[in-house]
Image (spheres, rainbow, N blue to C red):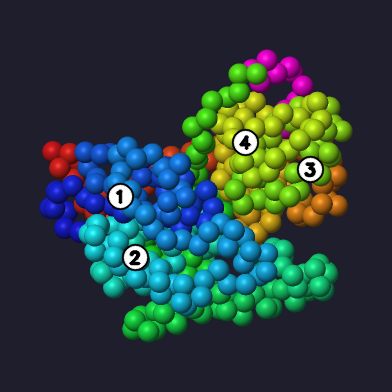
Amino acid sequence: MPSDPKSTEVKRVLFVAEAVTLAQVVRLLTLARALPAEEFDVHFAAATSAWPVVDAQHLRRHPLHSLTPAQVEGAVRRGTRLYSRRTLARYVEDDLRLLDAVQPDLVVGDLRWSLSVSAPLRGVPTATLINAYWSPHAIRDGFPLPHHPVVRFLGVELAGRHFQKALPFVFRHFARPLDALRVAHRMPPLGGLLEVLTDGTLTLYPDVPELVPTGPLPPTHHFLGPVLWQPEVPWPEEWEALDQTPIVYVTLGSSGPVHLLPALIDALARLPVRVLVATAGRLRLEHVPPNVLVADYLPGEAAVRRASVVITNGGSSTGYQALAQGRPVVGIPWNLDQLLATQAIEAAGAGTSVRAHVERMPEVGRQVEAALGGAFRAGAARAQAALNRLDSGERFLAVVRHWLGPSPTTSA
């Protein structure tokens, strides 16, 4: 239950990011910045590898152990569990030390599964940030077929025929280490992956219902709207004088199939477009075609604004950034999260996707041509209106204020 509304002390909020991709860190960082310093004592815990993007102003930083992005990417490629019970037990121990040190009124987590055990042990309410396409309440016809070694072995058609039937067993398999730990601490098991990902006192969706429709939601589940972020880097001065040639912005982020960039650039270089590529520092590209410009990082909003089409890893972060400005998206999804995000964008008619195989990259070029011809213009415009209707910072602040009660400034 929310705290006593008569309580007017400054509230302490702890953000805990599982820094396996950049998205987990920057989404929480963006929401943390929405909490006024005069009302909230804000703390931020993440692996120290995330510190370059975490502005220390207005928040107190705490180092926290996480799996590395390489470990997570390896697990995704193999189709194995992200966490063993031993790993989660270590996480719980680290969480408990952190909770005892900070003594928060609320913990906000993004992909930190262990909070499902540690926070209840300390009696601290949690707010879980997770995209609505992972919700048990999401309306869907089925889950997209992921990239998995068994798919390569059986083939897409045969694997797809049995995938939906096997999925409940697969989701229980992924949830089993956490459920075993919960049972050891006398907590009921959650049962499946969707329940694990959305577990919390509050569940917050950085989406809009027009793109990810759901059935009736519990009163503790809230749509926030898109949590948009861009790196604090300047626009390259030498790129200011771009001509009127249509621009295609390409970024596969910190978790996309970056190994496909050379084949992708080769496909796009054949088109009458200017290609702007942000590599996130993950790949050094040499001898690029003359109509291709490459940088490690770009201010995403400025790049999207200049572009006619945006090519992404299929995930919601850059996808929503593009759609918020009415730009159609061509996704190249790799993991299941990216496949689900792309599925939602396709269902809205705001873009399309191409499976992440090198031999499919010429198809990306054909989809870009279709987008330039207006194929997804109406859907992108509808998505733009929906995404701009909700301000995630304002809605997050309202939810936190409602749950924790008034602060000295709001009660004055």
Image quadrant assignment for residue 357? bottom right
Which dot marks residue 262? 3
**Residue drawn at the location 55% of the way across and 68% of the way down:** 82
The secondary structure type at the circle numbered 1 is: strand
Label 2, label 4: how far apart the Cα atoms are: 34 Å
Q: Which residue is mark 2?
A: 95
**Residue drawn at the location 69% of the way across and 56% of the way down:** 334
Q: Is residue 46 visible?
A: yes
Q: Which residue is mark 1?
A: 43
**Residue drawn at the location 43% of the way across and 54% of the way down:** 47
Q: Is residue 220 above or below residue 328?
A: below
Q: Is residue 340 visible?
A: no
Magenta region: 239-249
Label 4, label 3: how far apart the Cα atoms are: 15 Å
- Look at the image and tell me in which quarter the N terminus lies: bottom left
Q: In terms of sequence position, does the residue under pointer 4 or pointer 3 come before the other?
A: 3
Q: Is residue 68 above or below residue 324?
A: below
Q: In terms of sequence position, does the residue under pointer 2 or pointer 3 come before the other?
A: 2
Magenta stretch secondary structure, dominant:
loop
State the residue in front, 9 or 89.
Answer: 89
